[in-house]
Image: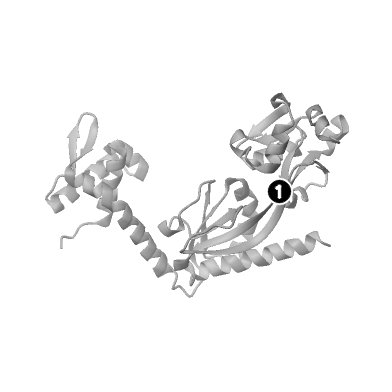
Amino acid sequence: MKNISWDNYKIAYQVAIDGSLSQAGKSLNINHATVLRRINQLETALEVKLFFRHQRGYKLTDAGAILLAELPSLITRFSKLEHQLQNVESKISGELRISTISSYSSQLAPALKAFRDIYPAIRITLLSTDDIVPLESGAAHVSLRVGPKPNGTDLIVKQLTRFKTSYYASAEYVKAFGLPTTDSTLNDHHWILPTPDKYRIPFVRHIVDNIDKDRIVFQSSHFPDVSQAVIEGMGIGPIGEHQAQRYPSLVQVTLNSPESEEAMWFVYHKDSKHSARVKCFYEFLLKRLESLTALETR
């Protein structure tokens, strides 16, 4: 078996995706010359051409097309192997990759800081996205998801907590404009709402269906932006009740909109069931949520 660097395969794969040495170099954060040298090394070792070189970039040969088709599954398997090997650690250390929805990631920062205070050898990578990160790929060890219970034959799913979202206005706004009393008075107010891709959410849909669109003075696809606009007094908008409790000047607005209670789930792949990092992170989050709930009920 020829002694070929695994990195050379990954570099060739990036060139196949990007179509040029310079773009692949940017994607991999290495220089153009290094990419060229590694491609030449790989083709020499394999005794086969992977690319046709021409003015428009690098095009795949038949062998290159096989590389492009087969390498993603190999990368996933190597990531899984790395993950399994790391799971046998006795010391709580190493990287912990966490995916969560973008609207929650900023609120997670205090908890992550407290977690690292307890386990300083942990290195955290946070993937903030509204897309579902496939845990079997190894891209994340843990996913914190909101909404219906996730399903998947290879997933382990545990409920962390439930939280509600209500409509709020700042005391400054209420002093200037008052509060809506019925659906017929909703058009008398300024509204802070998420962008139309979130209109399917029932408690958002109710407001959108009962107001003129020009009453929406601020929109964002990012819920923390919506919350901040409400806190600043721009209008009435949705904020999670757990977050609103941090701002005593906010006034909860009673509306006829549907209930908006959702569950947060702690999700990980079955290959991580023996991971000390995942286990400790789950137990830490549970204890932290329990302590926060106890404080709120005092």
Q: Is residue 82 visible?
A: yes
Pointer 1 residue? 260
In front: 37, or 176? Answer: 176
Q: Quick one: quadrant of the C terminus?
A: bottom right
Q: Residue furthest bottom?
A: 90
Q: Position of residue 246 (x, y in %)?
A: 77, 50
Q: Position of residue 161 (x, y in %)?
A: 67, 60
Q: Residue furthest left?
A: 47
- Give the residue type that dot 1 points to: Ser
Q: Residue furthest top?
A: 214
Q: Quick one: quadrant of the N terminus?
A: bottom left
**Picture residue at 16% right of the left edge, 48% below the top:** 43
**Picture residue at 35% right of the left edge, 40% below the top:** 26
Rendered view: 67 above or below 33: below
Rendered view: 104 above or below 196: below
Is disc 1 placed on a helix, strand or loop? loop
**Picture residue at 62% right of the left edge, 66% below the top:** 284
Q: Is residue 119 visible?
A: no
Rendered view: 34 above or below 154: above
Q: Is residue 174 left or right of residue 26?
A: right
In front: 12, or 216? Answer: 216
Q: Position of residue 133 (x, y in %)?
A: 48, 52
Count of numbered marks:
1
Among the 4 quarters of the image, the one containing residue 253: top right
Among the 4 quarters of the image, the one containing residue 78: bottom left
Q: Is residue 27 left or right of residue 166?
A: left
In front: 56, or 182? Answer: 182
Q: Position of residue 127 (x, y in %)?
A: 51, 50
Q: Is residue 4 left or right of residue 252?
A: left
Way the structure is coloured: one colour
